[in-house]
Amino acid sequence: MKNFEISVLDLAPVKQGKTIHDTFQDSLSLANHTEHLEYKRFWLAEHHNMESIASSATSVLIGFIANGTKTIRVGSGGVMLPNHSSLIIAEQFGTLESLFPGRIDLGVGRAPGTDGLTAQALGRNPAIINKQFPRQILELQGYFSKDNADSLVRAIPGEGLDIPIYILGSSTDSAWLAAELGLPYAFAGHFAPEQMEMAFKIYREHFQPSEQLAQPYVMACVNGVAADTLEEAHKISTTLFQAFINIVRNDRKPFAPPVDDMDDIWSPMEKSMVLQKLKYTFIGNQAEIENELKNFQEKFNVDELIINSHIYDHQKRLRSYEIFRDAVNSLSKA
């Protein structure tokens, strides 16, 4: 089993009984904590029209987190590129990289990050998405290039800056694209586990080296809920289960505190649907987490694991990331 990096995905979760200001302060606290624990990067994801997620203005929030930290890489996991013009994103991330040199990542995806009606309000055209997304990535690369200095349209700031681009995916489509362009690939296993194994196989087998990357770089996002005891871990994981029940029911309300028994909330069919979506969710004490991480890495051999933790109590969320760090450290010494 090869060693792997660990990173953070933060959706800026809004909790029942808390404000969005509280959410942002908790995100900054988490970023500082995981920076101290030597996590590699802290990513924020673009979502819209959801009471439970406050990361809609993703680049603004990246600036807030980067300004409050010192060394951890900060970026998007991701910006939903067809929601924006390529030039605007190049300028925004060029600004971020100019403010925080060597610390900014640009992860991009093609999904809307929201419902259909809101996607229309964002100005998306579903008929051209499959052509638009690859074209926009090439546009971004062009805007960041020094060679663009002779162009009539330039990204200032942005031009000539080394801003790494990562392609995100929740199906096999983006695996083909990441392989063709020779870019690092991150898969959303925390909510779309079904095609992850096939996506990684496609990416690795068809990868074409590029100026940005000589060999495949595989990243997997998973859910993680760790605690000092197995019982506590399963109790606090019920916030995650409730969040996914809300997705099934198309209910975007803020995240709920843990409950004693999920069977009081979900039906057998809902339970089956949620557990299928949470296939790659690691729940337990450190020993359990180590075992699950070992099994996962022996199967997928990833370069980096990105951990998303939906835990209602902020201090317990911080503790969860401590346990994951300890588990990974222990595995690396085995």
Image: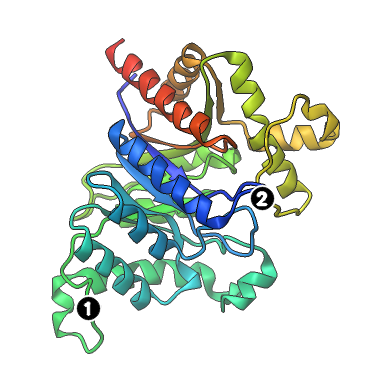
Which residue type carries mark 2?
A: Pro
Residue in view at x 47 percent, y 11 percent: 287
Please give left or right for residue 232 compared with residue 333 in the image.
right
Relative image position of residue 333 (x, y in whole percent): 28, 13
Which residue type carries mark 1?
A: Ile
Label 1 crowding class (10 Å Cα cut-off): few <14, some 14-19, many 20+?
A: some
Of the image marks 2 and 1, the number of the one nearer the N terminus: 1
Label 2 crowding class (10 Å Cα cut-off): few <14, some 14-19, many 20+?
A: some
Residue in view at x 14 percent, y 80 percent: 149
Mark 2 lies on residue: 254
Relative image position of residue 322 (x, y in whole percent): 40, 26
Mark 1 lies on residue: 156
How has the structure been colored for display?
A: rainbow
Quarter of the rendering containing residue 58: bottom left
Please give left or right for residue 184 compared with residue 146 in the image.
right
Q: Nearer the viewer, residue 256 or 103?
A: 256
